[in-house]
Amino acid sequence: MKVMKFGGTCLGTEDALKRTAKVVKNEKREKIVTVSAASGVTSSLKDILSRPMQETEIDEFLLKLKLRHVDLLPKRDGSSRKEALEMIEKKITKLDRLLYGVMYTEELTPRTYDLILSAGERLAAVVVAARLSHLKLDAVAMETDALGLVTNNEHFNAVAILSECEKNLRPSLQSAVGKGILPVVTGFFGITKNGHVSTFGRSGTDYTASVIAHSMKSGPIEIWKDVDGFMSADPKMVKNAFLIDRLSYEEAAELAYFGAQVLHPRAVQPARLRGIEIVVKNLYEPESPGTYVGNSKATRKDVIKSVSYVPKVSTLKIYDTGAGYKSGFLSDIATCLTNEGINLFSATTSQTCVAVIIDESDASAAKKAMKTHIAGVGESFEIEGGRALVCAVGEGLGRTKGVAARVFKSVASKNVNVELISAGASTVAYHFTVGQKDLRTTVRQIHKEFFGYV
Ligand code: ASP
Ligand code: MG
């Protein structure tokens, strides 16, 4: 059974939707479809929640949102259009009540936030199911909270509890597919054990696809997007960057975690547990093979396969003369930061200092957290902003002599100062920080060193 995931750009316009429907229709194997929100919808929901709302603003916002989805429905299709219109209406009404609730109470809890954010996928599933029904497929929109895609309680960054998901998703999806129904499942969110909607973070539908495939013990997973797949580098920086045809799970996970915007950082994990292959495909070049992610441990002669980056990070340094031997020091720092919802990209320690890399947007929250807790966790701290994180990935990197030397020598030859380096934790990736002004040079230099051109 195939799990086919369609991202927002595959659903945002009539043309994109027609292509999506064709791809699904042409797939003759048993399949489950999962969809993101139409492009821009999640961002617009986040946006309206980010500031005080006015009644008129809510009304205008919802009208626009409704019309956008109504416009995406097949035009001439009596019964399924009518049914879809009713469903859209219901979802908009619920969203209306939720937004008014937030406005009047001036309170937005993580639970409500995630519930509101999930509206984009619910609307998209209705539209896609209607489009597929129009092509005479027996498509039915299904929602992952109702299906029981159970997660932990971490709102915005929830993790699926795979054993529970399997127990809930497998029987219902299996029986639907057995009856010839094509499930069109909402991406991006699940439900906590207490019954609250929880989202997976931006691009979370990739993760949904992987959780579904894990539950069904079946694949492959196709991730349909508007790009070809994983590239040797960001083509905006390296003009001649090329498509990578095959990556190991570990390589893809490191690249996704360190900035390659191709896959949700956690999407690899459930698939990998069951050895299910992931294929990234371009809706606008469906014949292009895309990138396969699977068990292959193939090593390139020059080892490095791709270089990715996170453009804006900060380094938080916590000083303590006993940092190196104080037990629990690192975990105290980690707890202090994760309690504030701050994600740590990486940590390095020495005898007198622990340095952690965080997203630049978390820097002020990190500062506040450290100020409050510094007495408990160290003597002093500082935050260095303006940094970028670069990651070079390739199977065999941990076993091959001279790769690290080549990476750093090539970068040094351009006078770039490499700051924090992490090598060895992953056997397939090095990552390090440089000043933001040196990011482009660094990425290009590594590409040139390992591929001979930029
Ligand atoms: N709609 C969500 C987002 O834009 C999830 C997804 O696209 O997968 O981040
Ligand atoms: Mg999206």
Image (cartoon, rainbow, N blue to C red):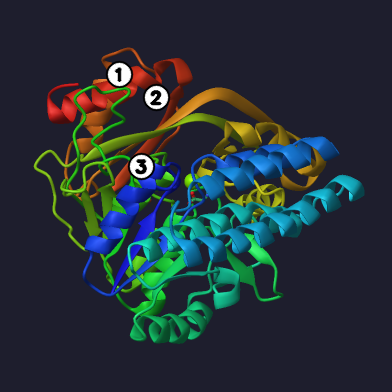
Dot 3, how many residues are within 10 Å of its Cα: few (below 14), some (14-19), or many (20+)? few
Left or right: 292, with 75 as reference point = left
Where disc 1 sits, the SS reads helix
- Residue 311 is situated, as x and y percent measured from the top left of the image, at 46, 28
Q: Quadrant of the C terminus?
A: top left
Residue at numbered disc 3: 15
Q: Nearer the viewer, residue 120 or 321?
A: 120
Q: Amino acid at mark 1?
A: Ala
Name the residue furthest left: 301
One can see residue 111 in this view: yes
Residue at numbered disc 1: 412
Q: CA distance from mark 3 to mark 2?
A: 46 Å
Q: CA distance from mark 2 to mark 1?
A: 8 Å
The residue shown at (51%, 55%) is 124
- Front label number (1 vs 3): 3
Where is 267 relative to 373, above or below?
below
- Residue 142 is situated, as x and y percent measured from the top left of the image, at 51, 70
The residue shown at (33%, 22%) is 442
- Front label number (3 vs 2): 3
